[in-house]
Amino acid sequence: MEEDFLPHTATIAAIATGPVRAGLGIVRLSGPAALSAARSLAPGLANPRPRYAHFVRFESEGTLLDEGLFLWFPAPASATGEEVVELHAHGSPVVLARLLRLVCRHPGVREALPGEFAQRAFANGRMDLAQAEAVVALIESTTEAAAQAAAAQMAGHWSTQVRALREALVGLLAHVEACLDFPEETEGAEADLPVRLAEVTQEAQALLRLGQRGQLLRTGARVVLFGPVNAGKSTLFNALVGFARALVDAEPGTTRDIVEAPLDWNGVPLVLADTAGIRETQASCVEERGIEAAKEAVAGADIALLVVPPGAPGQHIAAWRALAKPGSLLEVYSKCDLGIVPASPPPAPGENAEAEPPAPPVCISAQTGENMELLREALQQRLGGETAWAVAACSFRQRAALEECCYALESALGAFAEGHPLELVAAHLQLAQAALGQLLGEALAPEVLDDIFRQFCLGK
């Protein structure tokens, strides 16, 4: 690769707007040759002013290409930290492609790779990795709440919380290492370690919960209705969707396949799924396949909405509950207008009788609408409450880093409680600190960063 095209010296250019006909299109350049390359297409512009929109004629060898705006952002006060120029022309894909082709003929200029503008902004300290990933989340947002969450993360609100947690963790690790290095001077200083360690762990867990809620905003939540045949699942499904999407009939086993509908639930994108009724006998071969598909859908659901019909035996309810993964279950008693309440299930084997009982099921009637608002409120709480827009648009990578941090902190807390050496506690704290650094993009291998930024679109 020629020297002019090395990542730190090359000037990159790309069409920053979508590949469709529109009133406006933008060609963006970033790098040391950005201004000279862009000015070659605007010969009438002698002395451009920084951050000022100049109306120009775009020309090449005396031929008029278009008329539009020329904007120059000098380094380092630009989006990438480098010299940046934007050429605003009419949104013709042909015109924009021609402008891009001509600027790339200038020495030292090449077409940008996907996400390369954001990668340079990250490399030049204009944003951390969490902020850079928020650009993708904002572009891909499908609801107002998701867009607000991504914008807040892009502005650094999420990173501020992560850095505050890391500062607390660094202080705690320094305290532990002081106890190790100067045992005589710090005698008795270990007494407050369990309290401080528990506080930091709780802060990390709270941040993880925010991230999990934010991930639902970014990727959407999957809400699966399940339960026995004739429980009223399809009627409830239609009531939540707002129209007759699923077939409803008194004959058992009407639903054989998974029926889905996308919804915007107060700003949270979700997919609502109705599944085949679960029963162990009298099922045809086709229905049996539907039941197996229903069980798989429940196991992977973000919210598994168990619909329990009147008079259901307690042992059956316990078996249905066991199909959902921990923390995903939301239970409703259907057909409450009939006045029959299902029996309470017996405790699960090994269940702690003193443990806090789950929230009582909501008794609803999808047919009459009774208590449907209570169910909607319960769903909203599971999806992040009324302030879902305020959480981070967390990516899978960020969530994995937070989970790693929480696991390391919980391990440190356990090691201290079990009387293990402080060296082991410190090792766990170092792992937690490293996980937070990875969330912000620190100490990541170049190939990992390249892989992350390749997910971005061209011109971003």
Image (spheres, rainbow, N blue to C red):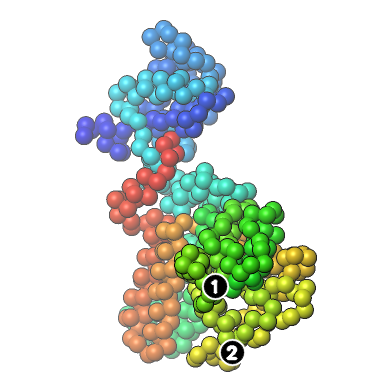
Instruction: Spot the residue most to the left.
Output: 1
Q: Position of residue 263 (x, y in %)?
A: 62, 53
Q: Secondary structure at mark 2?
A: loop
* Vertical position of residue 445 compared to residue 300: above or below: above
Tag 2: residue type?
Answer: Pro
Q: Is residue 450 visible?
A: yes
| Residue at the (59%, 92%) spot, across then down | 354
Tag 1: residue type?
Answer: Ile
Residue 226 figure quarter: bottom right
Residue 63 figure quarter: top left
Q: Position of residue 198 (x, y in %)?
A: 50, 79
Q: Position of residue 386 (x, y in %)?
A: 68, 61
| Residue at the (57%, 56%) spot, across then down | 260
| Residue at the (42%, 64%) spot, across then down | 400
Residue closest to the eye, 6 or 213: 213
Tell me, for residue 278, which label it has, or none.
1
Residue closest to the eye, 51 or 336: 336
Circle 2 residue: 346
| Quarter of the C terminus within the rendering | top left
Residue closest to the eye, 443 or 232: 232
| Residue at the (39%, 61%) spot, across then down | 437
Tell me, for residue 234, which label it has, or none.
none
Q: State the separation of the CA atoms marked 2 and 1.
A: 20 Å
Closest to the camera, between mark 2 and mark 1, is 1
| Quarter of the N terminus within the rendering | top left
From the viewer's perspective, is 243 left or right of 268? right
Instruction: Spot the residue most to the top.
Output: 62
* Vertical position of residue 417 compared to residue 302: above or below: below
Sequence-wise first label, 2 or 1: 1
